[in-house]
Amino acid sequence: MVHKKNIVKIINILKKKSEISMLASLSKRPPFQVLISTVLSARNKDEMTIIATKKLFAKYKTPKQIAEAPLKKLEPLIKQSGFYKTKAKRIKEISRIILNKYKGIVPEDMDKLVELPGVGRKTAGCVMVYAFDLPAIPVDTHVHKIANRLGWVKTRTPEKTEQALMKLVPKRYWLDVNEVLVIHGQTTCTPISPFCSKCQVRKYCKRVGVKKSR
Ligand code: SF4
């Protein structure tokens, strides 16, 4: 049985790390740009996403500008985002919907966000957290893997992890979960071979003791 007190302790310990995630670094930008950046970050490295977003927003900043931009002009700007042809079509369509259905304003609503093409719960959750400071628990591979390693959840899919975490983590900490676990996953609890011996939260981790740490 996981103690909520320990979850809060772990979150507070990991919050002391100095690194910030790519999305946190974009959180001062307008919500529309956070949304588009999150879509471009799918299955891509952060460094490449940053290059693509900088190039894109240097030329096209608003839903109207991207909706009206020809695909042939969008594609080279976001080439570093990977799958750029598909993503160019997607961000154009999202921009068109934001412009026509929501008068150019990104909705602060999980249900409306997940109706946008190519926007799943993880992307929508990132927009809620990083663009609007509203409670959500976006679950990417880091969050899914680490929540299982720590023993917070025992789940097979990110969707199940999100549901379990929403029951387990006190709501005032939801905003922190993605950020602290993504950074922990990038720096210490790496996907293939985590650095357990230098982990700040190892004494609370279920995996330690089960597997030999390094
Ligand atoms: S002890 Fe190891 S598995 Fe557990 S959270 Fe730390 S790095 Fe990850």
Image (cartoon, rainbow, N blue to C red):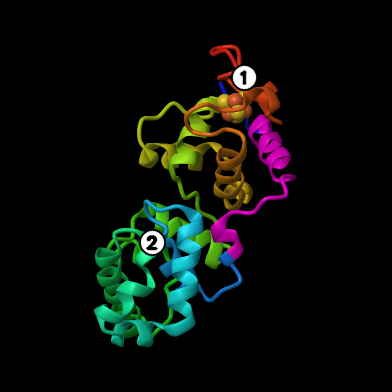
Q: Is mark 1 within 8 Å of ligand 1?
A: no
Specify whether 52 is left or right of 19: left
Name the residue that disc number 1 marks.
214
| Amino acid type, residue under disc 2 in the picture | Ser
Residue at the spot 39% in from the left edge and 40% down from the top edge: 158
Q: Which mark is residue 97?
A: none
In the picture shown, does residue 59 fall above or below 212?
below
Residue 77 coordinates in the image, percent (x, y): 38, 74
Residue ID at (60%, 12%): 209
Looking at this view, is 30 or 19 the one in front?
A: 19
- Mark 1 burial class by Cα count in 10 Å: few <14, some 14-19, many 20+: few
Q: Quadrant of ligand 1?
A: top right
Which residue corresponds to mark 2? 81
Amino acid type of disc 1? Answer: Arg
Residue range highlighted in magenta? 5-25
Tell me the SS state at disc 1. Answer: loop
The residue depicted at 42 percent of the width and 73 percent of the height is: 107
Percent x, y for residue 189? Answer: 57, 33
